[in-house]
Image (cartoon, coloured by chain):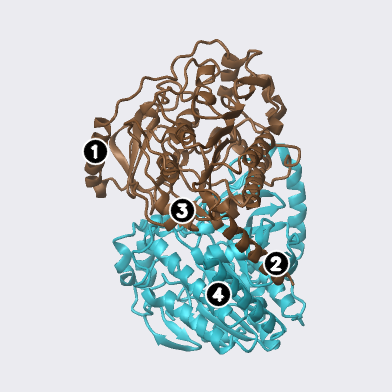
Chain colours: A brown, B cyan
Amino acid sequence: MIRFLSLVFILSLFIQTCSTDNKNDKYNFVIIFVDDLGYGDLGTYGHPTIKTPNLDRMAYEGQKWTQFYSAASVCTPSRAGLLTGRLPIRNGMMGKNHGVFFPDSQNGIPTSEITIPEELKKQGYKTAIIGKWHLGHKEEYLPLNHGFDYFFGIPYSNDMNKIESHENVKSNIRYPNYWKQYELKKLNSDNYNIPLIENYNIIERPVDQTKITSRFTKKAIEFIQNNKNEQFFLYLAHPLPHIPLYAGDNFLGKSKRGLYGDVVEEIDHGVGLIINEIKQNNLEDNTVIIFTSDNGPWLPYETHGGSAGILREGKGTTWEGGFRVPGIFWGGKIRPGIIDDIGSTLDLFPTILSLSESKLNEEKIIDGFDIKETLFRGEPTQRDVIFYYRNREIFAVRYGVYKAHFITQGAYNYPGPNQKKYLDEPLLFNLENDPSEKYNIYNENQGVINEINLILEEHYNNLTPYKDLLEDRSGVEF
Amino acid sequence: MIRFLSLVFILSLFIQTCSTDNKNDKYNFVIIFVDDLGYGDLGTYGHPTIKTPNLDRMAYEGQKWTQFYSAASVCTPSRAGLLTGRLPIRNGMMGKNHGVFFPDSQNGIPTSEITIPEELKKQGYKTAIIGKWHLGHKEEYLPLNHGFDYFFGIPYSNDMNKIESHENVKSNIRYPNYWKQYELKKLNSDNYNIPLIENYNIIERPVDQTKITSRFTKKAIEFIQNNKNEQFFLYLAHPLPHIPLYAGDNFLGKSKRGLYGDVVEEIDHGVGLIINEIKQNNLEDNTVIIFTSDNGPWLPYETHGGSAGILREGKGTTWEGGFRVPGIFWGGKIRPGIIDDIGSTLDLFPTILSLSESKLNEEKIIDGFDIKETLFRGEPTQRDVIFYYRNREIFAVRYGVYKAHFITQGAYNYPGPNQKKYLDEPLLFNLENDPSEKYNIYNENQGVINEINLILEEHYNNLTPYKDLLEDRSGVEF
């Protein structure tokens, strides 16, 4: 009887699919971008006690990418890279002394930059960002001035508030000392409370972070419902599981992995609701949903930080754990499978432009590659290089299976001092045979360094670094 | 059109299923037991570059267990535990000085022990072991004297041969020094070449290890074909990916993960063939296929060893990486899902006996629990304790989410000297919140140790250690 019901269900899907095939010409896009989630933090990427059935199913029905990279290993430049398809060194989002924007930062992403939603709007798409922006919180830099029709979210990271706001979780966290000092010095002002902004207006301050995940999920679903008869681009940028962690009442205390697991499981639940909404509106065949993270796990926070799985180190570093993140692509026309070619969030810009038949009118160096042939036909990606920038320098380069480190630096005291080291001779790893970067093979493969040096030379020849826009901090609050 | 074909396919499955539902009364069992495969070495357990589509599908359609343990962290006792449901300290398979049997060992598993196939034979099952035995290679101890109708395989580990046999892979391996010394001293004799045995007869010596995986898979499929109209128990114990590694021509050089990946991908391919055979004979609804590993990865061999994923350490140790292994259960009636309750290979004995309606005639302490309610209905397991024996001592105990270490010892120079340390105060970890055993919480949770001490007391009260059967080595070859 159960099997017979399945038959009916499949048949009805079949009919639905046929009836919707030509409803829309172009793809809708949903990017679900989470914060500080590590490579190893989902069931399908191997975590033993975080339950993510919706993301696991999304990965199994769609594509699970196992060598997928964020554009940077901290928040602001990673987001700039995703939305522009350009290495953040090209648009001022890499700072020498500051990794990201702070509540007293004066700048934002330059208006000369072209974002995905800016291009899509020209094609008639409805565009929204729900969640964390972190590319400039002064009015002129807010999302509505960068291609979005709608913004509902927070302007910077969820930890950028006064210290009292952390107290409800403090008992569970053993913060390293630097964290308290950092907060006390910089952020102990009444105004440093995270605002919830709708378009240009603060509608709640401080935002209630225990409800932040469920509210953003709900807003995302509303946006889909309101725009189901149009083309849409939805950028759902959850501010969690960045510390401090907050889970909703239905999830708090439910995960075996503790509060961090609660938070990830609440996000996973939301992903399920969104996929369900797409299916219910018969949009699955012309929607591409992308799930990924802005960088690796923030390791100093013990069990409040995530896991990079077998990858080395985490957020802030140029080891794999900092840059490589889960990358899941789902949609009716995506060819299911595991993709172990190299991909990057930088590739989303050209891919989405290609799928929406957009054409850039300006000459701009784009650092991404169109991956649609991989998504729909399983073809190899064109990418064989990853530049691992930290601050404004290239610390490491991946070329094919090889990765050379020229400068190393840990993350554990980040953002404090942390032993930056210019290497006399590079470290070289085979990332596919040795994904944990354990066994230096420089001596046996010195010729690879010559090739990498040629790649670097070409890169620098085509690079005009934009001035450091993260440097300018007034000390005056938002 | 593709969707329409799916319909026909599902319909035919439906008809097949109905027609076979009552063909057999009891379950068939296939245990695929691999050697030294780590927790993190399959796609579905998070490995980025080892491709295991068949095991991934098996896990997705069936149950993927994320807290599943082998009975020991080395070969011989792990196999004894699986086949008897008893901690190997009870049957002499834990040695003080030797972890496993060697080609000059004099003993084998006692005939007083009852194995799974011994019980199943009483119920009319046909039983076979294809692959590695390693519970005594003298005739009286061979599988046909322990419940198996058929043996096709090797008597001990695939590295227990003279040193020249390793030369074809030597250039790729950086063996630690101890390995060479160990081989030269103990094994440099013409007779130390791995024999391939059928029942009691050596049919090839040395066995061609490049063909070992494909031959064993083929033999397993033949056994299923020959016994498809009866109840059967198949124990397919692949000797690989234990070092030295060998892959068949169709797999050599194919994996991004190098030779280790080639070997695992060949095993995965074989798993696909076996599942296919089960499906083609309409046996899926009354067959349970179990895939697991005898212990964690053997870490000293660099890229020739596997990965325990986020778990600490590997083979030979009592850290999680030594004991926790992939555990996948598949079969038409198994309720799909991820199981993050605690399970053990010790549980297979009582579960298989229960599902085959066998009843032990003798009084024997069984250390396993029947997990059929978990397999078929998703109920919680009854297990909340794991004893981590090393040699003949308990080094650590898991109780619920907690694990206490009383003795620690690394694996890196195993089997050489490696700093055994009796701890003045135990280390305590929460394995579910902190699966990598990083954050000692002993100070905040000393009461847990009292509970664990009570569990230990009860254990010792019910324990009669069997004499050390691994100790007796003559120096004379097989």
- Gap in Å between the C-alphas at discs 3 and 1? 27 Å
The residue identified by callout 4 is: B275
Q: Is residue A41 toward the left or the right of residue A372 in the image? A: right
Residue at horizontal 26 percent and vertical 31 percent from the top: A460
Quarter residue B330 falls in: bottom right
Indicate which disc residue A453 carries.
1
Q: Taking A256 as reference, is B358 above or below it?
A: below
The residue identified by callout 2 is: B375
Number of marks present in the image shown: 4
Q: Is residue B135 visible?
A: no
The answer to whether the residues at label 3 and label 1 have Cβ atoms under 8 Å apart is no
Q: Is residue B314 toward the left or the right of residue A466 in the image? A: right
Q: Mark 3: which secondary structure?
A: loop
Q: Taking A56 as reference, is A240 above or below it?
A: above
Give the letter of the chain under mark 3: B
Residue at horizontal 36 percent and vertical 62 percent from the top: B181
Image quadrant containing the C terminus of chain B: bottom left
- Gap in Å between the C-alphas at discs 4 and 1? 49 Å
The answer to whether the residues at label 4 and label 1 have Cβ atoms under 8 Å apart is no
Residue neighbourhood size for the residue with mark 4, other residues' Cα within 10 Å, grouped as few (<14), some (14–19), many (≥20): many
B290 and B93: which is toward the camera: B290
Where residue A44 sits in the image (x, y, percent)?
56, 53
Residue neighbourhood size for the residue with mark 1, other residues' Cα within 10 Å, grouped as few (<14), some (14–19), many (≥20): few
B392 and A142: which is toward the camera: A142
The residue identified by callout 3 is: B48
Residue at horizontal 58 percent and vertical 71 percent from the top: B79
Q: Amino acid at mark 3?
A: Pro
Q: Mark 2: which secondary structure?
A: helix
B445 and B97: which is toward the camera: B445
